[in-house]
Image (tube, helix red, strand yellow):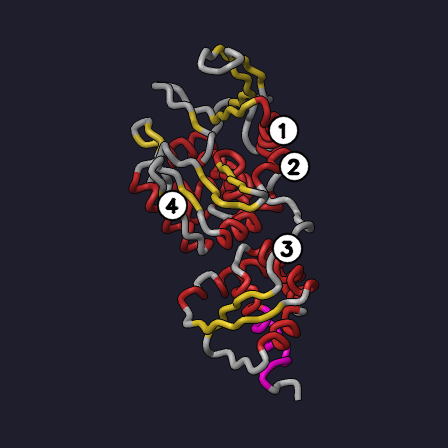
Amino acid sequence: MDQSTLVEHLYKILPKDAIEKVTGKLLGDGNISVEKGKRGRFRFTHSAKDMEWSEHCYNELKANLPLNPPIYRKITDKRTIKGFTECYYVQSRTAIPIDVLRNLWYYKNIKVLPKELLYRSLTPLTLAWWYMDDGHLKLKNDIATKLVLSTESFTQQELHFLQKILLSKFFLHFKIDKESRLVLYDKPSICYFLKLVKSHLIPGMSRKYLQAKKDNLNTGPKRTSIYLPTYFKILTPTKEFNDVISYSRALQEQLITTVGHIQFYKTYVNTQKQNRKSYQIIISNDNLYRINELQYLTGFEKSVCVQACFDFANRKGRLYGDDQ
């Protein structure tokens, strides 16, 4: 049976959301046993600190896959300070959906990427489960500096495929580091990724998303340089910039929704390529807070956030004489 036929069969015997969750697990820590002469069993292991995640996966999938409840294990490991590690292990019984998954994900008993399945099943829900399994968010002073998806088990060819599909589906420009991991380094992409997955993350994974930040947003110089595309015609920079920053509140209301954040990201992710002109301005304390808040939410530099305020005001007919 070819891969396309297997994918179609899988969607007939499992619900769409279950397939997306299992796809996330198999991109991450999940695997299917490949003992010779035996049918496969879906299984995964998580450390004791992620017991909530183990139980969540079990509860979310047990209606569609014959899973046994998580089992606590204590494993001797002299490499650790305690001399042992603790984890929770989940394994399924045999079932037809797992047979199909095994045929998709394994070739000659080696795990491979099922491209046809990923084209269809890679969604924000899939990303979230993959991220909770094998993702890491690096923070410095509460600011995201790097987001990592551990992909060391995949070949370079498979990593390039994942790069391309993540770019085509989500406009995410992942890099491949020296450890064969997929990495986001730029703040806008990290904020956007986290917005895509946030609604699917469980409380126990709070270390993997940005916490709401309301303090220290008005720090920094009041006099600053803002760079706008040359097509803007600014006559009184300080006044016009302060007037237009008031629209940041309305922009934030749009960014609360995933659709709004996606549109914002797609609009401004490549704006650094535009020809720009520098403006020296003085920002009021209130407006400095507003623009820093918008910058924290989106990850974009102040100049891009101010540009977005101008664009929003222009759409509302408040610029260039449209309000006359």
Mark 2 lies on a secondary structure that is helix
* Residue indicated by mark 3: 219
Q: Secondary structure at mark 4?
A: helix
Q: Establish if 141 lies above or below 271.
A: above
Label 3 vs label 2, nearer the camera: 3
N-term-proximal mark, 3 vs 2: 2
Q: Nearer the viewer, mark 3 or mark 1?
A: 3
Q: Which residue is mark 2?
A: 203
Residue located beneath label 4 in the image = 162
Residue 296 point in image, percent of width and height: 59, 54
Relative vertical location of residue 293 with respect to residue 9 in this rendering, above or below: below
Q: Residue 178 location in percent, x, y?
A: 33, 38
Residue ranking furthest to the bottom:
324
Distance Cα–Cα, label 4 vs label 2: 27 Å
Reading the image, the residue beneath label 1 is 52
* Mark 3 vs 1: CB contact within 8 A: no
Contact check, label 3 and label 2, Cβ < 8 Å: no
The residue that appears at 55% across and 50% down in the rendered structure is 196
Label 2 CA crowd tier, 10 Å (few <14, some 14–19, many 20+): few
| Magenta extent | 309-320
- Image quadrant occupied by the N terminus: top left
Q: Are marks 2 and 1 in contact (CB under 8 Å)?
A: yes
Nearer the N terminus, badge 4 or badge 2?
A: 4
Q: Earlier in the sequence, mark 4 or mark 3?
A: 4
N-terminal label among 2 and 1: 1
Mark 2 residue type: Pro
The answer to whether one can see residue 62 in this image is no
- Please give the name of the residue rendered at 34% of the width and 19% of the height, measured from the top-left corner: 36
* Residue 308 lies in quadrant: bottom right
Residues packed near mark 1 inside 10 Å, few (<14), some (14 to 19) or many (20 plus): some
